[in-house]
Image (tube, coloured by chain):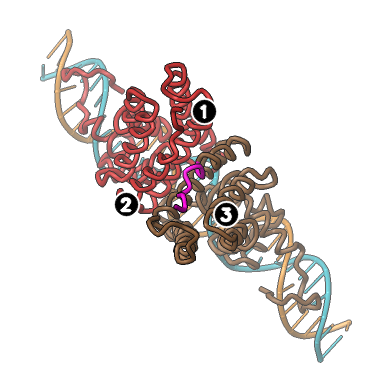
Chain colours: A brown, B red, C orange, D cyan
Amino acid sequence: MNTEKTNKQRGRPLAFNQEEALEKALKVFWSRGYEGASMAELTEALGVNKPSIYAVFGNKEALFHKALAKYLAGPVAYVASAMNEATARLVAESFLTKSVEFLTNQNNPRGCMVVQGALTCGQGAALIQQELAGYRKGYEDALRQRFDSAKSQGDLPLTVNSSDLAKYLATVHQGMSVQATSGATREALMAVVEMALRNWPANS
Amino acid sequence: MNTEKTNKQRGRPLAFNQEEALEKALKVFWSRGYEGASMAELTEALGVNKPSIYAVFGNKEALFHKALAKYLAGPVAYVASAMNEATARLVAESFLTKSVEFLTNQNNPRGCMVVQGALTCGQGAALIQQELAGYRKGYEDALRQRFDSAKSQGDLPLTVNSSDLAKYLATVHQGMSVQATSGATREALMAVVEMALRNWPANS
DNA sequence: TTATTATTGTACCATTAGGTACAATAATAA
DNA sequence: TTATTATTGTACCTAATGGTACAATAATAA
């Protein structure tokens, strides 16, 4: 395998673009889940034969991890950027609103890969299942921390439980992912967000 | 195959209890999903060899459907009973509260089988995926209808959009299922329910 | 040129998947 | 008893799974 990025390499050159191939693999894993995506379907989607995939990416699990990394660094960056909003309320609003836009983006598979990549699975995928659950916990924790600092900044009532609020928003996000996967429209989910945020804790 | 329920049958008697076997199969499908559950694991769990399973239940898909029917008729009956509460607000409260009790019941696999049975899957399970999505839509529709009649009874402001409210509650339910699957506690989810219902539309 | 390096496509491998043939067995009916 | 019926356990089947051996090929270095 060649990991250099220069275009003057020693042997026969790669006949495909790694990043494009990874993008295609991502969409297969995203829509089918880790176990639902077969190597046959992946090779078909990538337009690359199996030995080349294995030479470049390792194996199915490594391919999944590289696709997942691309997912987390790319489409899902909105989660991190939402944390930078000025107030806790704006953080929540940005998080949920951008979630809806993302979850119902027609150019992507429906739903969130971190939710549906391996919600249930056979024994063999237990580690991937745990890993994805860890990422879910990750953004919930990020929300909690953001709300903690919002409280110390007087931006959120001290009576509010940051963990509960973060879990509530993560729950709505994950529920909307399930909804999007089964075909809910952007408009319908925007109405859900509106309802979910209607009860924002008053600052008095 | 013998479908009679009398205990004076012609041939060799069944060596296992069908309902108990179905209960065990249900728990495997519930925790692993349709595709994640292998016939090997199912036979192991049931303590029954494959030819007997096939003779009595048909095939894997038929076994899943019979287990699903048992799930819908049994553990999940709380959904239907919630619709009978006196007011729309009580319906929502009962639906979400009983959901939490159910989703975190230590005697059951975590989460809701209708959510996680086949959220994503290979091509071969597409019909089961659609079927489960249909059941999700089913209880959302039931909530919507209940809210429609609540509006006509003056129990809910006419300005409320029943579809949006029903979808909001279904979304929270499905999100809590994901949370429960990844280990959220009953207490944490009860706090989520409390937040989710805090913004109930005022009747003025 | 020639040697070296690395990727390609074909054809294959072992394992597991869901599913079944069949003789043995255990019950009832005649 | 004997025949009939239906389930059992063993041992197997075919197809699909993830993964690979290997010769052919296409590039660079000497």
Q: Is residue A142 left or right of residue B14?
A: right
The amino acid marked with disc number 2 is: Thr
Q: Looking at the picture, which amino acid does disc 1 mark?
A: Val
Magenta highlight: main SS: loop
Q: Amino acid at mark 3?
A: Leu
Q: Give me the chain letter of mark 2.
A: B
Residue B191 part of the magenta-drawn span = no
Q: Which residue is mark 1?
A: B160
Between disc 3 and disc 2, the foreground one is: 3
Q: Are marks 1 and 2 on the same chain?
A: yes
Q: Residue C17 appears in which quarter of the rendering? A: top left
Q: Residue at x 70, y 57 (%)?
A: A48
* Residue on which the image places disc 3: A90
Write down the residue under mark 2: B185
- Which circle's residue, 1 or 2, is located before the other in the chain? 1
- Say which element carries label 2: loop
- The answer to whether residue B28 of the structure is visible from this angle is yes
